């Protein structure tokens, strides 16, 4: 055995210094930013995701401000997790025939597969970009039209690509 | 029988049968819209083309009757192309309403679109615009754009309900279905037009926007609205909620139709009208405990030979099997001798047709079955007046009431309630929440509604019909047979005597 | 007696010059210029009702009568060209149901106005033919279904019938033969489709003028489900001449397959439009030059519509080389039809002509069966986009396939009446459509179309 190895075996502080050198090297590299870390300082910094990122759903609106969804229930049919609950109703707007009075997605059941977006024929439901959602009670994970269409994060950018053409629709069904 | 040849194969069919019907019975589908076996032949939709060898012009199958030597081809390329173009003509002015149309999933255009395969339309012009969502009264909404002018509804109102309320106005591609002066429809059979309309032009207001058709399952049953006993299909979702009733073909009873008064009878089976848990004096308890409680009181009376203080009230809406099990358990096993019921004899005597079509005056659905079973089992029945008398004389200490889910029995129950002394132990077995509220102090055991029952009922013509059901809406609601079997088992269980307080 | 004079103010007879032209052969219109020939005394003085007397007083056997008409080989003059004697023969002989004879005076085919001459000037000839025809098919009642727009003609015909009743030619025991007959005038209400035989029957029954499914044919099950024969005015007007002069004499005139004469109502770019009666088989060239006075303003012939707008169009070469009879015109791909001839010179834009026709057929389609109801609308919309210079190249093929899929697929032949002309225009005058495509501002298939007033 060499003299250095003898010394190392007998004294403990050489091992400590060696270890500390490794730690120090990691410390300096990380602290000064020389090494690119995959960890980011969330929530001050957030990752940029692609436009295809599947986050919490968005219900789009028509240019006039009403909800674009016609309550056809294709999204509920296609959903593999059976998490969409829709109740259709006669719209108070006389130019629209059918709209969802209740549109709820149970985020605890949802697997964020995007089948609902694929199924929708009128571009009413899309997978949004939000992923932050924390609640204290399970009940609060069922989100309704208020959150889906009108949450402030959307900044009113969820306009459907399908516009209703100028068409006279006269309904006499409503009692009013 | 006639020998016909379809697509090269020989078949034997009844002579004179319509070719479309004959082919359907043989499993060969000839697409059609305007043909309906219960109505006259129109030949308007031009979808049911068939080719006859030797004739270069295609013929329509609905105008052909099966006779010896008839030879047709339904799957040649020429026929398929003609059907494709016929569908194209149907679709060129049809609005693309599938997301908002109630008929999606059972729509004639959708079905043949997938089958025939004319996937891309070549029409690039503007479509005809007509009125949408026209209010035709309390029961029907008409959408004039979706109408494909098959004429089935018009022929129905002319030939079956004989009111001629619907007609076709204007000529050519401006043709629309409508009523005279846009009046509302008044007759009692109008929702049948919704059933026969192949597209979503006529839709039922009751079912409007309620549910998508592909979520619903069908179960065959019989309507309990009156003694006509029209055969129906119950449409429910996962056995939890019934959405609508549709008539089922029965040549002897109701052919293809049912009256509108029978259609809302499913509502009493749904949540808002149902007693969903057993109650004792307003407090909920599990059903088996309720049965035990019942048995406790009954046992005392049976043991002390006071069965003449027990009475039972039954009604003619019960199925024959239910009545049999009631008699066998309560009379034969427990020795109860006093049975009272609605006046079924009078209902049967006063029964007659109300409108020359289907509806009858007797609103109980199993009057004939009730009379038959009670006479076969030699059951002595008292009337409501006699029950009231005995209640007033405080001679009854234990009353078992079987309550119907319909409005028809409510008057009698109110009279019983009024005559009921405070210390009489009452057991109410009924699906109906309002009955339980009427007898709020008593023991209420939920039973199943008419559309969940498996049993037999007999209509006014003494035709026996089976109620078939495969779902139960509430776990705590049991059938009458199940309740009584459990009661009987409870009776036979050895246990300590419990003295009646 | 129909009293409508007080309701309509503009009742006038049709202005048409009925002077005989060289080249005409007048069997029916022989006495049309005699003043008051529409009244009974004048008609009788010119030999009227001789045929009826011949048939009834000799108590001619009905079989013989039908054979006589069959022997003359006269064909239906309303458009279909079906041999009249054969049609009469189809009526079953031994039923207890009443029989009916319906006279189709609903002359709505565009370009046709020849029946109007008979109705306004020679009503008694038609009435006589109807009584003889009713006798042949054992009909106790006949109806004249006259189009609602012919107000003047209705009054003339009605008066003529009243005169016939007074003279004993109608009513009970006509001329002592034991044959009873009632004749009623029924007015139409402005629908082309009521000129179709089963549409007429439906309208007469009081229902919507919707054609009925065939089979069963009207000769077996027609008006009120009884055996019915529907004949055109001109066909029935031929009957007295045939009875008076004999079937062979009639068969000698014209060609072997198209016997007798035909009344033609000529309109369009000719010097002398009007109603002319010529022998079948006369070359069109002679007809145009001699009878109609040649093209107006000396222009060149471009196209000819021989038999009303339902007939496929003929090019100038085809027209000049054909003779005016059923076979020759059919061999050129067109049809003789009702005899409503429209002559088009080289100043006419044929796409506009076709669009005009398509508008008519879309308006008049009854809407019962889907290919016609939707197809007529579709064709009109495509042609509208052509004339608005918004058509695409694919529209040419689309016109063709749509028309091909309307022919033979409907209850009556209104769909064929627009589809066959469209195909003929596309085939014979493709250049006309190309002109509209050249200037078209619409080349892509998804751009918006001109909004059309549906």
Image (spheres, rainbow, N blue to C red):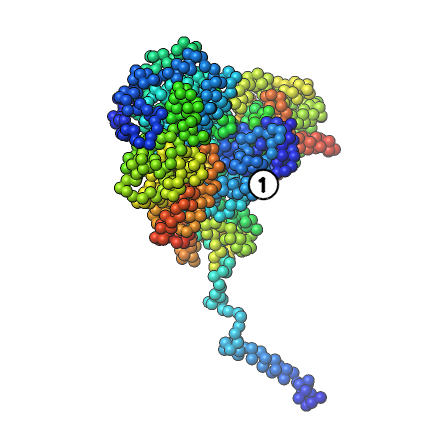
Percent x, y for residue B323? 65, 25
Q: Quadrant of the N terminus of chain C?
A: top left
Q: Secondary structure at mark 1?
A: loop
**Residue C346 in view, yes or no:** yes
Percent x, y for residue B374? 65, 20
> Could you say which quadrant of the image residue C402 lies in?
top left
Q: Nearer the viewer, residue C31 or B405?
A: C31
Is residue B288 rendered to the left or right of residue C314? right
Q: Which residue is mark 1?
A: B75
Residue positioned most to the bottom: A3
- Bin the neighbour count of mark 1 within 10 Å (Cα to Cα): few under 14, some 14-19, many 20 and up: some
Q: Chain of mark 1?
A: B
What residue is shown at x 49% (from left), y 30% (from top)?
A: C213
Answer above or below: position of B70 versus C344.
above
Percent x, y for residue C391? 38, 49
What residue is shown at x 71% (from left), y 23% (from top)?
A: B332
Q: Nearer the viewer, residue C15 or B131?
A: C15
What residue is shown at x 39% (from left), y 11% (from top)?
A: C175
Q: Quadrant of the C terminus of chain C?
A: top left
Percent x, y for residue B98? 48, 43
What residue is shown at x 42% (from left), y 27% (from top)?
A: C252
Residue positioned most to the top: C176
> Could you say which quadrant of the image residue C102 lies in?
top left
**Residue B244 in view, yes or no:** no
């Amino acid at each position: 055995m060499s003299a250095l190895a003898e010394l190392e075996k007998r004294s403990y502080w050489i091992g400590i210094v060696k270890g500390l050198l490794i730690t120090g090297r990691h410390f300096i590299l990380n602290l000064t930013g020389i090494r690119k870390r995959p960890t980011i300082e969330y929530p001050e910094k957030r990752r940029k995701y692609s436009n295809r990122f599947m986050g919490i759903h968005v219900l789009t609106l028509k240019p006039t401000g009403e909800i674009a969804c016609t309550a056809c229930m294709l999204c509920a049919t296609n959903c593999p997790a059976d998490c969409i609950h829709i109740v259709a109703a006669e719209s108070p707007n006389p130019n629209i025939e059918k709209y969802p009075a209740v549109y709820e997605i149970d985020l605890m059941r949802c697997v964020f597969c995007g089948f609902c977006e694929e199924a929708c024929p009128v571009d009413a439901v899309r997978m949004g970009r939000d992923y932050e959602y924390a609640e204290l009670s399970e009940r609060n994970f069922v989100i309704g039209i208020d959150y889906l269409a009108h949450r402030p994060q959307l900044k009113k950018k969820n306009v459907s690509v399908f516009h209703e053409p100028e068409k006279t629709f006269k309904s006499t069904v409503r009692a009013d | 029988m006639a020998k016909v040849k379809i697509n090269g194969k020989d078949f034997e069919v009844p002579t004179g049968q319509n070719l479309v019907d004959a082919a359907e019975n043989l499993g060969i589908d000839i697409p059609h819209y305007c043909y309906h076996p219960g109505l006259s032949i129109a030949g308007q939709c031009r979808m049911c083309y068939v080719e006859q060898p030797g004739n270069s012009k295609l013929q329509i199958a609905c105008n052909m009757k099966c006779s010896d030597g008839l030879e047709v081809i339904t799957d040649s390329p020429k026929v398929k192309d003609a059907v494709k173009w016929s569908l194209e003509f149907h679709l060129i002015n049809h609005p693309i309403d599938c997301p908002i149309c109630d008929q999606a999933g059972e729509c004639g255009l959708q079905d043949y679109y997938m089958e025939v395969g004319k996937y891309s339309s070549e029409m690039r012009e503007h479509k005809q615009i007509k009125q949408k969502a026209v209010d035709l009264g309390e029961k029907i909404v008409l959408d004039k754009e979706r109408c494909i002018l098959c004429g089935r509804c018009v022929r129905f109102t002319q030939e079956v309900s004989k009111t001629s309320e619907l007609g076709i106005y204007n000529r050519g591609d401006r043709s629309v279905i409508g009523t005279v002066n846009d009046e509302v429809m008044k007759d009692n059979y109008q929702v049948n037009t919704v059933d026969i309309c192949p597209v979503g032009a006529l839709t039922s207001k009751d079912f409007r926007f309620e549910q998508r058709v592909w979520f619903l399952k069908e179960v065959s049953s019989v309507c309990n609205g009156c003694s006509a006993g029209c055969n129906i299909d119950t449409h429910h979702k996962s056995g939890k909620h019934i959405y609508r009733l549709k008539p089922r073909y029965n040549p002897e009873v109701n052919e293809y139709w049912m009256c509108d008064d029978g259609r809302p009878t499913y509502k009493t089976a749904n949540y808002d009208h149902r007693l969903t848990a057993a109650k004792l004096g307003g407090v909920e308890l599990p059903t088996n405990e309720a049965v035990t409680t019942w048995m406790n009181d009954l046992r005392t009376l049976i043991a002390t030979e006071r069965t003449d203080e027990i009475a039972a009230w039954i009604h003619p809406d019960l199925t024959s099997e239910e009545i049999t099990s009631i008699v066998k358990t309560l009379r034969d096993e427990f020795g109860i001798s006093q049975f009272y019921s609605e006046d079924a004899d009078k209902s049967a005597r006063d029964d007659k047709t109300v409108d020359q079509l289907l509806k009858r005056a007797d609103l109980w659905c199993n009057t004939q079955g009730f009379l038959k079973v009670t006479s076969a089992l030699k059951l002595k029945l008292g009337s409501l007046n006699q029950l009231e008398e005995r209640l007033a004389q405080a001679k009854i200490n234990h009353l078992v009431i079987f309550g119907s889910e319909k409005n028809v029995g409510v008057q009698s129950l109110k009279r019983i309630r009024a005559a009921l002394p405070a210390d009489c132990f009452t057991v109410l077995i009924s699906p109906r929440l309002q009955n339980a509220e009427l007898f709020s102090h008593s023991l209420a055991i939920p039973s199943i509604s008419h559309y969940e029952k498996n049993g037999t009922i007999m209509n006014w013509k003494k035709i026996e019909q089976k109620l078939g059901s495969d779902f139960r809406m509430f776990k705590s609601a049991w059938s009458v047979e199940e309740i009584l079997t459990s009661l009987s088992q409870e009776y036979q269980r050895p246990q300590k005597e419990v003295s009646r307080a | 007696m129909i009293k409508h004079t007080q309701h309509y103010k503009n009742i006038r007879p049709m202005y048409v010059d009925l002077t005989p032209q060289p080249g005409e052969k007048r069997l029916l219109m022989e006495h049309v210029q005699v003043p008051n020939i529409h009244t009974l005394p004048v008609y009788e003085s010119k030999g009227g009702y001789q045929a009826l007397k011949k048939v009834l007083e000799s108590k001619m056997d009905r079989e013989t009568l039908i054979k006589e008409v069959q022997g003359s080989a006269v064909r239906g003059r309303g458009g279909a060209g079906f041999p009249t004697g054969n049609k009469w023969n189809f009526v079953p002989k031994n039923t207890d149901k009443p029989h009916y004879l319906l006279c189709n005076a609903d002359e709505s085919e565009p370009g046709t106005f020849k029946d109007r001459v008979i109705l306004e000037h020679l009503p008694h000839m038609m009435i006589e033919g109807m009584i003889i025809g009713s006798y042949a098919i054992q009909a106790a009642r006949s109806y004249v279904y006259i189009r609602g727009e012919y107000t003047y003609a209705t009054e003339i015909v009605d008066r003529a019938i009243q005169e016939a009743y007074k003279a004993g030619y109608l009513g009970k025991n006509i001329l002592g033969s034991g044959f009873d007959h009632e004749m009623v005038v029924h007015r139409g209400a402005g629908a082309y489709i009521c000129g179709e035989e089963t549409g007429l029957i439906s309208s007469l029954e009081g229902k919507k003028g919707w054609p009925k499914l065939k089979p069963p044919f009207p000769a077996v099950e027609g008006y009120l489900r009884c055996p019915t024969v529907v004949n055109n005015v001109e066909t029935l007007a031929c009957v007295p001449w045939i009875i008076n002069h004999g079937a062979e004499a009639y068969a000698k005139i014209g060609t072997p397959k198209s016997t007798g004469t035909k009344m033609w109502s000529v309109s369009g770019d000719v010097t002398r439009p009007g109603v002319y009666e010529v022998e079948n088989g006369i070359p069109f060239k002679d007809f145009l030059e001699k009878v109609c006075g040649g093209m107006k303003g000396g222009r060149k012939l471009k196209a000819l519509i021989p038999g009303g707008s339902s007939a496929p169009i003929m090019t100038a070469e085809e027209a000049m080389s054909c003779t005016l009879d059923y076979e020759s015109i059919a061999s050129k791909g067109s049809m003789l039809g009702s005899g409503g001839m429209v002559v088009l010179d080289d100043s006419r834009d044929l796409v506009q002509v076709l669009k005009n026709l398509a508008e008519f057929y879309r308006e008049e389609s009854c809407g019962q069966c889907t290919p016609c109801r939707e197809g007529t609308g579709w064709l009109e919309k495509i042609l509208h986009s052509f004339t608005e210079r918004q058509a695409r190249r694919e529209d040419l093929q689309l016109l063709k396939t749509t028309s091909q899929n309307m022919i033979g697929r409907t209850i009556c032949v209104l769909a064929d009446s627009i589809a066959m002309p469209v195909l003929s225009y596309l085939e014979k005058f493709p250049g006309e459509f190309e002109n509209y495509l050249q200037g078209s501002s619409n080349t892509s298939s998804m751009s918006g179309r001109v909004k059309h007033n549906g």
